[in-house]
Image (spheres, rainbow, N blue to C red):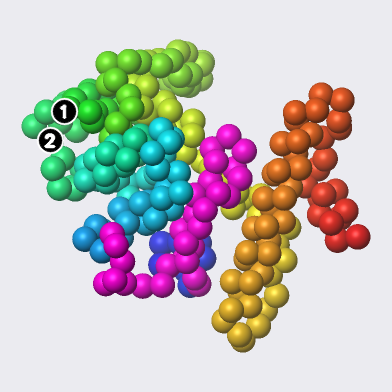
């Protein structure tokens, strides 16, 4: 993948908790599988369905980026009593460009929204040249949240933002947070055997999850001192 920092390697899809960054599910990408029960879906759609399968019918809220988002995916999750929110590519099928303001019309800080049945689309232009579009099955597009932005003079001011975009920015970083924790103290070992890379990845993932679980216990105990990541790994090594 030439656009990624690590261009070559194994692809592992992951699902993580946005509050703690705890890794709750994963799937190693093995290429196209015609026997898959979600074979009729696109790669992004069936990846989300596989990862969320143990958590369906429990009214969970799932966040993902525009690689996975589609009306069909949100509809399938909604039928399973699971809500979803994610950024949306404007060149995707069924994007209602006639219902949302044109890119040239929106000015910085302005937003527009549309809703159909149980799904809503929010479009907002922030600092960048292009607007951000978020699709959701759990947000009212008319509900706004307040965020702080730096104006041209350098002062912080409050501006309104659609609730779906606000929540997406708030809860989206779960997998990145887990990856950052895991990359803090890497344990990989170079080898010509392909499975060694996967073995050390999951060993490191297990250690990281243990640390997250340990710190969660410390937070629940007001009298306990929080343990640093380094101290936890040192203790584990000893």
Is residue 67 located in the magenta-colored stretch of the structure? no
Q: The N terminus appears in which quarter of the rendering? A: bottom left
> Crowdedness of circle 1 by 10 Å Cα count: few (<14), some, many (20+)?
few
Residue 9 seen: yes
State whether residue 129 is above or below residue 122. Answer: below
Instruction: Please report the residue visible at 50 percent of the width from the left and 57 percent of the height from the top.
Output: 26
Residue that sits furthest to the front in the current view: 57
Residue matched to label 1: 116
Whether residue 14 is in magenta: the answer is: yes
Q: Is residue 219 left or right of residue 196?
A: right
Which SS class for mark 1?
A: strand
**Front position in the image: 238 or 8:** 238
Position of the C terminus, as image quadrant, is bottom right
Residue 74 coordinates in the image, percent (x, y): 28, 41
Give the answer, above or below, for where 108 lies relative to 184.
Answer: above
Q: Position of residue 63 (x, y in %)?
A: 41, 39
Task: Give the vertical position of 61 relative to 176 (above or below).
Answer: above
* Residue position marked by numbered label 2 in the rendering: 97
| Closer-to-camera residue (17/91) | 17
Regarding mark 2 in the picture, which secondary structure is present there? Answer: loop
Q: Nearer the viewer, residue 206 or 131?
A: 206
Q: Residue furthest left?
A: 98
Residue 115: x and y in percent read 19, 25
- For the magenta stretch, what is the residue range? 9-38
């Amino acid at each position: 993948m030439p656009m990624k920092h690590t261009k070559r390697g194994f692809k592992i899809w992951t699902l993580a908790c946005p509050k703690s960054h705890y890794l709750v599910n994963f799937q190693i990408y093995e290429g196209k599988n015609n026997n898959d029960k979600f074979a009729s879906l696109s790669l992004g759609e069936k990846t989300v369905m596989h990862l969320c399968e143990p958590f369906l019918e429990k009214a969970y809220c799932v966040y993902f980026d525009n690689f996975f988002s589609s009306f069909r995916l949100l509809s399938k999750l909604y039928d399973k009593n699971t809500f979803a929110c994610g950024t949306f590519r404007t060149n995707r099928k069924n994007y209602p460009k006639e219902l949302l303001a044109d890119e040239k019309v929106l000015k910085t800080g302005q937003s527009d929204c549309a809703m159909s049945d149980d799904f809503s689309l929010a479009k907002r232009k922030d600092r960048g040249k292009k607007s951000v579009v978020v699709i959701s099955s759990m947000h009212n597009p008319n509900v706004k949240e307040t965020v702080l932005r730096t104006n041209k003079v350098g002062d912080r001011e409050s501006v309104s933002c659609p609730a779906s975009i606000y929540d997406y920015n708030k809860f989206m970083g779960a997998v990145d947070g887990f990856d950052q924790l895991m990359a803090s103290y890497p344990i990989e070992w170079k080898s010509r055997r392909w499975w060694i890379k996967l073995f050390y990845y999951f060993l490191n993932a297990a250690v990281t999850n243990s640390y997250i679980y340990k710190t969660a216990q410390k937070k629940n105990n007001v009298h306990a001192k929080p343990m640093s990541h380094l101290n936890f790994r040192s203790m584990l090594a000893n």
